Image: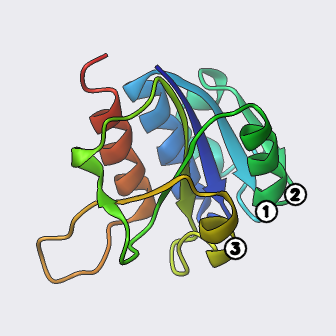
Amino acid sequence: MKIHVVLDNIRSVFNVGSIFRSADGAGHVEKIYLCGITADIDNPKLEKTALGATEMVASEHYDTTEDALEGIRDMGIPIYSVELTKDAKNFQEIDYPNELALVFGHEKNGVDKKILDKFSSEKIMVPMRGKKESLNVANCATAVLYEITRNC
């Protein structure tokens, strides 16, 4: 199993650090693609939540999410966007391929519509059973990464 994690303009440095820790904990993450306004690993605030995980998981910063996803698509890797859309499938009911990319979006705006339309092979979502519409992006990434790697 190989997972590529794409962070589409995540504004909170602390969410990015938490995603690094979850990526390391779940294992199988090949690389984290830090896109647009998403903090790069040289941001001193990142270490407060990453706690060394930036040393464990490869990463690279891209000016735009499109740049990162074009490279991923050129490698033939299917792209799964995690977003609450009408056509999104429950993340627990998917047979995932051995290699995939997961796109997680901006805390307020989600995955950019251009990304959903142009790059997404699949759209998946974490069902909400309470009153809130969505999870924090770092919590969402943790749930999805652990579900995908559950049988590894």
Residue 117 % position (x, y): 63, 70
- In terms of sequence position, does the residue under pointer 1 or pointer 2 come before the other? 1
Q: Quadrant of residue 9?
A: bottom right
Residue 110 % position (x, y): 53, 73
Q: Nearer the viewer, residue 41 or 70?
A: 70
Residue pictured at 37% horizontal, 71% vertical: 87
Q: Dot 2, how many residues are within 10 Å of its Cα: few (below 14), some (14-19), or many (20+)?
A: few
Residue 30 % position (x, y): 61, 24
Badge 2 element: loop
Residue pictured at 38% horizontal, 38% vertical: 145
Q: Which residue is mark 2?
A: 63
- In terms of sequence position, does the residue under pointer 3 or pointer 2 come before the other? 2
Q: Which residue is mark 3?
A: 114
Badge 3 element: helix
Q: Which residue is mark 1?
A: 36
Q: Are marks 1 and 3 in contact (CB under 8 Å)?
A: no
